[in-house]
Amino acid sequence: MLAIGGPDFVKKIAPREIVLVGGVNLNSVGTRTLGLAEGGQRVTLFETDYIDQTNRANVSEFIHTIQHEYIHILNQNKPFDEKTWKTLTPGGYTADWYNYEIPESNELGFITSYARSNINEDFAETASMILIYSKDEYADFLAGIQSPFALQALKAKEAIVVKYFKEAFNMDFYALRDEAEKNTTSVIN
């Protein structure tokens, strides 16, 4: 297995506690919390009893959650460029993100509707979704964006993610994505 961040990356910066919860964590508005990252040290993952290794979409959702929460751990230890990020889609953030369909959010420059909840979730969603997509899937996603503004914002966000991983961890984000795709495929029965 290729160690993208080097052999000691996970030893230096990783959650020290991982809590696995079998059940659903349903919120009062009807959304589900799939994971939490706390204090740069702890990750909690929900719905672990529902993982179906024969279903690629199910496995991908779970791995996306792991990646998303791990990115929060990384950000809690080494912040990303929040100042620049805030300028890209400042009017699109909303507390009721769950009322918007994903394609509508995509056309506003967000990779998912959940990314609209705040800049920290936007960064984690952007990075983790690019990691869960293959190179071709991500290219197809971008090709489907109709709004020039949204496409520009999504590409700018991608560039910040790539720069963050390089500068903060000396890591090639695209090599990480390619390795993540191989590892996801290897888990599916």
Image (tube, rainbow, N blue to C red):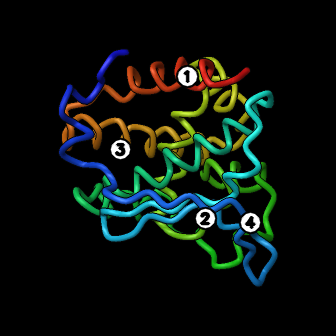
Decide: few, some or many residues near mark 2? Use Cα within 10 Å; few <14, some 14-19, many ≥20. Answer: many
Decide: few, some or many residues near mark 1? Use Cα within 10 Å; few <14, some 14-19, many ≥20. Answer: some
The CA distance from mark 2 to mark 1 is: 25 Å
Residue labelled with disc 1? 181
Disc 2 marks which amino acid? Arg
Query: Residue 22, how many percent across, how many down?
Result: 68, 59
Which is closer to the viewer, label 3 or label 4?
A: 4
The dot on residue 5 is: none
Using the image as rendered, state which of residue 101 and residue 151 is in the foreground.
101
The CA distance from mark 4 to mark 2 is: 22 Å
Left or right of 78 on screen, residue 179: right
Point out the tag, 2 or 1, that comes first from the N-terminus: 2
Residue shown at 35% from the left, 35% from the top: 162
Decide: few, some or many residues near mark 3? Use Cα within 10 Å; few <14, some 14-19, many ≥20. Answer: some
The CA distance from mark 3 to mark 4 is: 33 Å
Disc 3 marks which amino acid? Ile
The CA distance from mark 2 to mark 3 is: 17 Å
Residue labelled with disc 4? 24
Label 4 sits on a secondary structure element that is loop
Assign the C terminus to one quadrant of the image: top right
Query: Residue 44, how many percent across, how many down?
Result: 51, 62
Using the image as rendered, state which of residue 73 and residue 85 is in the foreground.
73
Occupied quadrant, residue 100: bottom right
Residue 110 in the image: above or below residue 179: below
Residue labelled with disc 2? 116
